[in-house]
Amino acid sequence: ENSEFIRIYYTEFGNLTNGNETEGPVQDAYLQQAKILEDLLAPAVEKGELRCARPDFLAFLIYDMVRAAIVHRLLGWSKGTLEEDVTQLDRLVWNGVAPE
């Protein structure tokens, strides 16, 4: 539905990660979204419901995994259905951070 916007956003994100853009709206959006996720994860980390000790790091990992899955779908590299990709991502994230 918003694939063109997402393509532009991730193109600009690529510029951020290769040093072409070190600050600006793309960086601000990335950091803001990661902070929202961090704030959601922090209480669960504090309660021991997630194994990661650093919710900031965990937020970036999850955010980047989701971003990678979106990019693969946009580029046509995914061999699965949307549902299969979402299920795999869900399992990787939540089984990976589940308490031991």
Image (cartoon, helix red, strand yellow):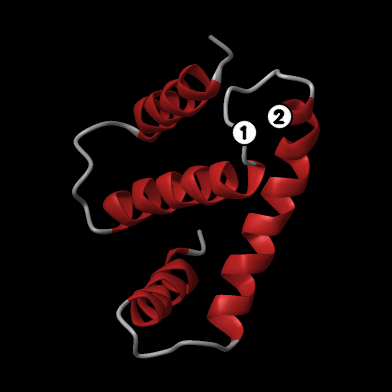
Within 10 Å of disc 1 (Cα), the crowding (few <14, some 14-19, many 20+) is few
Quick check: 70 left or right of 38?
A: left
Marks 2/1 in contact by CB < 8 Å: the verdict is yes
Can you give x and y, in whole percent of width and height, for residue 37 in the image?
Answer: 68, 47
Can you give x and y, in whole percent of width and height, for residue 79 in the image?
Answer: 19, 35
Within 10 Å of disc 2 (Cα), the crowding (few <14, some 14-19, many 20+) is some
Residue shown at the point (28%, 51%) measured from the top left: 72
Can you give x and y, in whole percent of width and height, for residue 80 in the image?
Answer: 26, 31
Please name whichever residue, 12 or 77, is drawn nearer the observer in this view of the structure.
12
Residue shown at the point (42%, 72%) measured from the top left: 4
Return the mark for residue 45: 2
Residue matched to label 1: 53
Please name whichever residue, 40 or 100, is drawn nearer the observer in this view of the structure.
100
Query: How far apart are the two marked residues, 2 and 1, measured between alpha carbons?
Result: 6 Å
Can you give x and y, in whole percent of width and height, for residue 48 in the image?
Answer: 71, 19
Residue shown at the point (48%, 17%) measured from the top left: 95
Instruction: Say which element carries label 2.
Output: helix
Residue shown at the point (36%, 76%) measured from the top left: 11
Give whichever of discs 2 and 1 has the lower sequence position.
2
Amino acid beneath label 1: Ala
Please name whichever residue, 54 or 38, is drawn nearer the observer in this view of the structure.
54
Instruction: Say which element carries label 1.
Output: loop
Amino acid beneath label 2: Val
